[in-house]
Image (spheres, grey):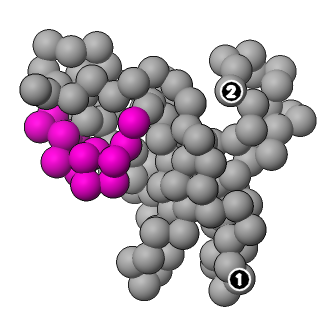
Amino acid sequence: MIWFTVISSAPGAQGYVTAAQENDYMREMHAAPTAALLDPDGQLGHLYDAKTTPHMFVIDPSGVLIYDGAIDDRPTPDPADIAGATNYVSQALTEGMAGKQVSVPTTRPYGCSVKYAH
């Protein structure tokens, strides 16, 4: 499995980071994506029509988009809510990797808006 985190915030906009800042943040969060992709001109974000941070996309090994939306069904920043949440990304990965059709292929993403360059 490959996990990319994509940062599409424009220089000078909220959410913009340098490669060094993103590497520091990933270490601090104990996150281990395959790579963090800096997309300051928004090409990749626009390609997938990313609207929020986060906005999750799951692409199967053949390159087909099988999930597009929120991480889970609890649009709250409270960590206590995670335990009872339906994790749509995990569900899509499990179903997709088992060769099954994803039962919930699209949800409404939630979070701050992506700050694209104009």
Q: Nearer the viewer, residue 107 or 37?
A: 107
Left or right, 83 with respect to 20, comes to: right
Q: What element carries label 1?
A: loop
Looking at the image, residue 64 lies above or below residue 48? below
Asked whether 38 falls inside the magenta stretch, the response is: yes
Residue at the spot 52% in from the left edge and 25% down from the top edge: 111
Left or right, 32 with respect to 22, comes to: right
Left or right, 42 with respect to 84, comes to: left
Residue 116 appears at what percent x and percent y? Answer: 21, 29
Q: How far apart are marks 1 and 2 (CA)?
A: 27 Å
Q: Which mark is residue 75?
A: 2
Looking at the image, residue 91 lies above or below residue 70? below
| Quadrant of the frame with the C terminus | top left
Residue 102 appears at what percent x and percent y? Answer: 68, 71
The quadrant holding residue 7 is top left
Residue 24 appears at what percent x and percent y? Answer: 35, 25
Q: What element carries label 2?
A: loop
Return the residue at label 1.
100
